[in-house]
């Protein structure tokens, strides 16, 4: 069942990448709309599942709801009409080159090896993977450290829940504005602002843990950290999706400039995106292990300051990364 879930998530990610690749100058606004829809669904899902669990005979039967939603998603993808140019591209015979294909001939020209051998593709993969991984690590870390830090301080669950609600509330409010900013001002200003907010938020969690539950300043520090992390989430969620779309569009443009046929371009971009997903998944597997080891073997304070340091160190990458040049 979990294998099925993983396949569904990857299909969703690939479809999302295709949508953003074709969004052009509106890529930031499209990604922010997708993020907002995701947050709305995440906010509504716990209430809906709680109401549905008992009529269905138990929470274990919610898996059947997930299967039904997966089937509905597949049906909607199959039923969505495509423009004539996309239909023509889909029916173009594969490996029918208009011009020479870089990286080799035949199937090798659009294979994973060709993607990794091509210096331009490698450069874009490295730039997009590094920035998306940085954003993903900082977002994932606060989802763990925020509740753990608050509970470790001995705060009641109600206070911890209120802080998390503040964070997720801010995260859900601003993505649409951030999307417009991404398209108007470019990727780099948004990335710089998100690093500032992540550094303040994670550093604030570490400081709150040092203050202790009896300190009068604790409430203000926790509130400031929660708000900073929520704003960082608002800034970074559309940014990560947009950077993946930028990288895919750059790969597609290079292939088209060399005169590749539509079928070849489609296959090459699909393998490029799959390689990027693998790199991000690799980071997504190992950074939670590192986070857990630091939090349990050292302290939650050390883990909070560690990721505040990661955000500060990220400034160098943000200022120099070619992935943010759009």
Image (cartoon, grey):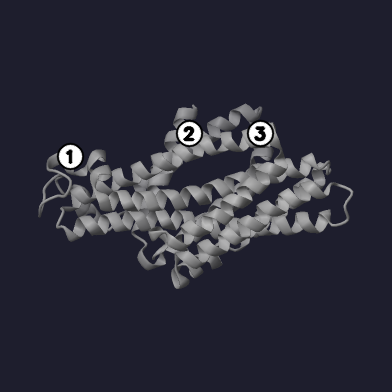
Quarter where residue 241 is shown: bottom left
- The correct choice, above or below, for 138 with respect to 228 in the image is above
Q: Earlier in the sequence, mark 1 or mark 2?
A: 2
Q: Is residue 13 left or right of residue 142?
A: left
Q: CA distance from mark 1 to mark 3?
A: 50 Å
Q: Residue at x 79, y 47 (%)?
A: 210
Say which of marks 1 and 3 sits in front.
1
Q: Is residue 278 left or right of residue 121?
A: right
Helix, strand or loop under label 2: helix
For disc 3, the marked residue is 53
Residue 245 percent location from the top left of the image: 38, 56
Q: Is residue 41 visible?
A: no
Q: CA distance from mark 1 to mark 2?
A: 31 Å
Q: Is residue 73 left or right of residue 94?
A: right
Helix, strand or loop under label 3: helix
Q: Earlier in the sequence, mark 2 or mark 3?
A: 2
For disc 2, the marked residue is 5
Residue 14 percent location from the top left of the image: 38, 46
Q: Residue at x 55, y 35 (%)?
A: 65
Dot 2 and dot 3 residues touching (CB under 8 Å): no
Q: Residue at x 84, y 57 (%)?
A: 217
Q: Nearer the viewer, residue 118 or 177?
A: 118
Q: Please state, as top left, top right, bottom left or bottom right, where the C terminus lies in the image.
A: bottom left
Q: How many marks on residues?
A: 3
Disc on res. 108? 1
Dot 1 and dot 2 residues touching (CB under 8 Å): no
Residue 183 percent location from the top left of the image: 44, 69
Q: CA distance from mark 2 to mark 3?
A: 20 Å
Say which of marks 1 and 2 sits in front.
1
Q: Earlier in the sequence, mark 1 or mark 3?
A: 3
Residue 71 percent location from the top left of the image: 44, 37
């Amino acid at each position: 069942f979990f294998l099925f879930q993983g396949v569904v998530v990857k299909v969703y990610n690939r479809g999302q990448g295709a949508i953003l690749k074709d969004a052009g100058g509106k890529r930031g606004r499209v990604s922010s709309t997708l993020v907002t829809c995701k947050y709305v669904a995440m906010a509504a899902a716990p209430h809906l599942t709680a109401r549905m669990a008992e009529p269905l005979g138990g929470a274990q039967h919610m898996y059947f709801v997930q299967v039904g939603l997966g089937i509905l998603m597949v049906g909607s993808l199959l039923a969505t009409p495509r423009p004539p140019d996309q239909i023509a591209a889909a029916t173009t015979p594969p490996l029918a080159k208009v011009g020479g294909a870089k990286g080799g001939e035949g199937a090798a020209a659009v294979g994973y090896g060709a993607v990794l051998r091509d210096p331009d593709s490698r450069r874009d993969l490295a730039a997009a993977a590094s920035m998306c991984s940085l954003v993903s690590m900082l977002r994932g870390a606060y989802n763990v450290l925020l509740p753990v830090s608050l509970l470790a301080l001995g705060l009641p669950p109600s206070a911890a829940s209120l802080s998390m609600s503040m964070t997720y509330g801010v995260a859900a409010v601003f993505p649409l504005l951030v999307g417009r900013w991404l398209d108007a001002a470019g990727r780099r200003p948004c990335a710089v602002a998100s690093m500032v907010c992540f550094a303040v938020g994670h550093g604030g969690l570490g400081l709150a843990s040092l203050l202790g539950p009896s300190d009068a300043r604790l409430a203000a520090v926790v509130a400031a950290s929660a708000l900073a992390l929520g704003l960082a989430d608002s800034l970074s969620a559309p940014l990560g999706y947009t950077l993946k779309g930028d990288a895919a569009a750059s790969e597609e443009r290079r292939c088209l400039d060399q005169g590749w046929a539509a079928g070849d371009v489609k296959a090459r971009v699909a393998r490029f995106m799959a390689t990027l997903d693998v790199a991000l998944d690799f980071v997504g597997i190992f950074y939670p292990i590192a986070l857990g080891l630091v939090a349990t073997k050292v302290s939650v304070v050390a883990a909070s300051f560690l990721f505040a340091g990661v955000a500060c160190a990220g400034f160098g990458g943000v200022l120099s990364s070619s992935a943010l040049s759009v």
